[in-house]
Amino acid sequence: MSVAAYCIFCYRQIGTSGPATKTHLPWNDIRKIAKVTGSLILGGFVFITYEVLSLKKLLQIDTQAIHQEKLKSYVYVRTTSLNPSEYQGITYQARKEIHKAVRKILETEAKIFRRPLNEQFSTFDGEDHECALWLLLKRSQSEDKEVRLQAVQDLANNSHWHDYQYGTVAQTCDQRTAIGLARSKDIDLRFFLPPPPLPKIKNDYPIEDELRLLLVSLPQTGLDPCVQYFTSLALRESSQTLAAQRGGLWCFGGNGLPYCETLSKIPSETVELFCLQALVQHSKVSSHCDKIEAKGGLQLLQRIYQLRKDSAKIQRNIIRIIGNMALDERLHSSIVRAGWVSVLAEVMKSPHVIQSSHASRALANLDRDTVKEKYPDGVYVLHPQYRSSQPIRADILFVHGLLGAAFKTWRQQDIDRRLDKKASEGEEDYSQCWPKTWLASDCPALRIISVEYDTHLSDWKAKCPVEAHRKSIAYRSNELLDKLRAAGIGDRPLVWVSHSMGDSPALKELNDDFLSFAKDKKFSVLSFAETLPTHIGSMIKLHVVPLESAKLGIGDLIPVDVNHLNICKPKKKDAFLYQRTLKFIQDVLAQELGD
């Protein structure tokens, strides 16, 4: 029997289970091994020595396992079962030590004679059932991209490991693997280390003061005048003066999202949100992101995120900042070391589409192994949000209208429980964003993107005392176009889905230009027109876009018995509004979708 064959046989024998009293080591086998190692194993004294050495080793800390995590405050200790039925006794330990000795000789022989050695035995020093884990970890760091990606996928698909094995992966995998795992669907959160502990701060030292110190360290030039105004205000005002003002509703940056809630509510959180909104604007500037990282901003944001678990707005703005900083690949290592991968992986599982989509955008910007595009602030991928082997054939781009938003504009029609009891019974199936749920399910080969941007009725106008220049449609269009180019829009066939943008001379001119261009390129166009008035308050009913105004002069126009708000919100998945939209998309992309 050759040495290599015996090594495999011995390895398999080591992995067997059973009471120690029924397991025997053949003397002939021992003699053969002894000849190879150059020594003769005699008597029980050697077995006792092996047992003592093995027990000693079990109590040692495996420092190699934390080599790549040496900058973090973690210590890895290999766990050992205390279950007597799993203890293999002296014979088991003897076989294990003999196996190690043989393997060492094989490694030496391979080096001397320059022979290839099976990687399963070349460096692996663990139990039989852990072999797959360590091999996957090794392959996840391969220079071969296909091997690397497959290893990460295989790691993510494992659901039968023990806690300590997930902990092993968490502490030994590299940055690229951790990000890949976080972008894997239904990933087990035990794959990730929790954020590193932060130094304690004094009870009388409010977080808002730390935010102000961070803001004051950032450049105050080259920004929108209103951003400068709100930043300076956040630096000088205290929670007490803000609470005393009780100034109603402040809005910031458009997008239909209120900047702050009524100032009588939890002043400290209000000020924190105030500062975070200013920090969001700074994070759009690459050089400012460098300073945020250098001043410990990633750790400060982590502290606030953990303290404000009950504030979705605060957490959403923090993840938005992380997503902006992730656009700069130089900051990826700092973001990972600050513990944000585990946070983002957890938020990806959120049932709230806004939260999960912000986390998805941040992780996509971190994942340079499978994502070539970058998603700037306000550009969100609704599908696919995880790594997938499904090839993307075309893009669908959703653009909201006046006072709209990337998610709320495209939600399912709101349910009136008083009028529709049957619909309210199925409320658990309500879609917060039908392109993400319904359309992604019906057309998995599409990349679905929704954008958010400032519309003309900007929230700056009411509360910003600075006479900020009113950005033109052309300026905002070019700004949005640059973001879409970075996201890879234009690389594939594209379908635009948009809601009403209102009426103005400038928009009418744009519409005329579009008509000329669309007719020349023979675009397929489908329009829906509202037939019901929209309630504005309790007293006013307004037909926002009459049928005559809805006629583009190209393509089909379909009147629908809904108001202006619900023209883009199907009542349910089998409603005409959604089904006709789906059919149009499938028809124009029939070649790409393979139908």
Image (tube, rainbow, N blue to C red):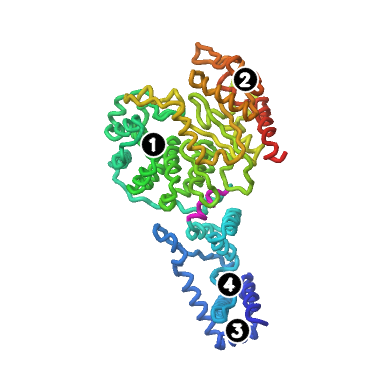
Mark toward the viewer: 3 or 1: 1
Please state if 557 lies on the left or on the right of 188 as rendered. Answer: right
Mark toward the viewer: 2 or 1: 2
From mark 3 to mark 4, how far is it between C-alphas?
17 Å
Sequence-wise, the earlier of marks 2 and 4 is: 4
Sequence-wise, the earlier of marks 3 and 4 is: 3
- Residue bearing mark 3: 33
Find residue 536 and report its horizontal and vertical position in percent.
50, 15
What label sits on residue 121 in the rendered view?
4
From mark 4 to mark 1, how far is it between C-alphas?
54 Å
Sequence-wise, the earlier of marks 3 and 2 is: 3
Q: Amino acid at mark 2?
A: Gly
**Element class at badge 4:** helix
Seen at 59% across and 69% down, the residue is: 120
From mark 3 to mark 1, how far is it between C-alphas?
69 Å
Q: Amino acid at mark 3?
A: Ile
**Element class at badge 3:** helix
Q: Amino acid at mark 1?
A: Gln
How crowded is the residue under tag 2: few (<14 C-alpha within 10 Å), some, or many (20+)?
few
What label sits on residue 553 in the rendered view?
2
Q: Amino acid at mark 4?
A: Phe
